[in-house]
Image (cartoon, helix red, strand yellow):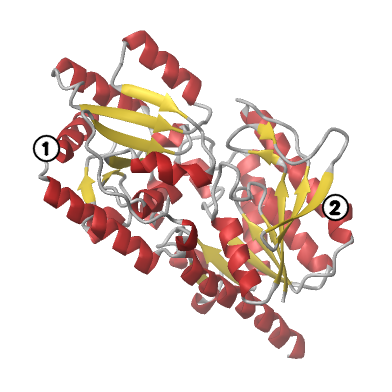
Amino acid sequence: MRVWIVNQYAVPPSEPGGLRPFALAKELRLAGHDVTLVASSFNHWTRRETRLSEGRDTLVEDVEGVRFAWHRTPAYPGSTVKRYVSMLSFAAAVANSPVLNGLDAPDVVVGSNPHLFGAYAAERLADRHDAAFVFEVRDIWPQSLVEMGRLSPRHPAILVMQAIEDHLCRRAGSVVTLPPAATDYFVSKGLDRAAVFPIPNGVYLPDLPAPSPLPHNEVYTVVFAGIHGVANGLDTVLDAAALLREAGLDQKVKFRLIGDGGEKPRLVERARIEGLTNVEFDGPFPKSRISEELARADAGLLILKESPVFRWGVSPNKLFDYFGAARPVIYAVKAANNPVEEADAGVTVTVDDPESLAKGAVSLAETARERLEQMAANGRAYVEERHDLAKLGKVFEAALVYAVESKRTKEKS
């Protein structure tokens, strides 16, 4: 099959960002398919133009056998409005892409919804080339925006996005969903249950170093590695750090926050003003370096603000990075699933509760090393069994084949 995957934020392994699109594309390539990743050359995590020289708007580049079709989009440092402009710009660039017009027509087009506009552009490409369409859903948009309190359900933007989502669900030959409990949602949208393929995030095991032993840090170091956004609720981390300092435990536990995002400058300034010496900021780092940084940590932290949207479950990349690095995890999420509990790979604390987070961190710091090593091993075994992207790539291939065969069946009937 010739496969086009439209995902504005797809990156190669040499850049910071989520590796899932590239890893799944590479697995398709290894299975004999011709794959093109259609992406923006502006890196969402570093907020920098990374692939296109001045004066160029597009570029086709081979990365480990996967073809990237890069498209220039506007920068959006610290601006929600400019980010939406970038989304629309990407959709327009993809819909009218000269480099895509120069490629052999696809058999199937995947539209990934970091936002719906790019997925809609992918659906238009599929229609233009008489190809099957697969809708990959990373977040339930626009419902997530409503339930996180960002916009009213009657806001014009929400009504437009809801119309787009409904259209994409009607058009899709299959749906790939990251939220593990979202199948019923898409069945309610009219899809057959067999057409919904839950595929969580994961790790690419061939690139994952063998787990290193737990370190002997003088201060127990809990690492958060990811986007510093509103949804992550990182003020809770700073509040927990302040409680530890008040209790005289700031030399026992510290938090290291790796990454970037809209909230980072404010968080850095807050930690400076409050003198939170048990909070460190660093990064962002390329994906290839994250394992090295996690090897220096005692534990990982997965934290998200409480939201009704998590009733469909969560599948964050950072959790599987922690598991892959064989580090116990503090799980501060209220969701339909709890992989840390399932794997017996750490501790669960109350969401949006600094005291609970502080106690959880101290609890791990005081846990016997033998027990911590068992937690670490459990997490590594869990991710190898359930979240190996090589295995998930076969499920992804099945979703594409299902869409192509469904289209053929409809054309014959």
| Residue 199 in sight here | yes
Q: Which residue is pictured at 37% across the width and 24% down the height?
A: 280
Q: Quadrant of residue 125?
A: bottom right
Residue placed farthest to the top in the image? 273
Q: Position of residue 78 (x, y in %)?
A: 60, 25
> In this figure, which residue is indicated by the disc labeled 2?
97
Measure the alpha-carbon separation of dots 1 and 2: 57 Å
Q: Quadrant of residue 381?
A: bottom left
Q: Is residue 94 left or right of residue 263?
A: right
Q: Nearer the viewer, residue 178 or 250?
A: 250
Q: Nearer the viewer, residue 338 or 367?
A: 367
Q: How many numbered circles does the render carry?
A: 2
| Residue 353 in sight here | no
Q: Earlier in the sequence, mark 1 or mark 2?
A: 2
> In this figure, which residue is indicated by the disc labeled 1?
366
Q: Residues within 10 Å of mark 2 (few under 14, many from 20)?
A: some
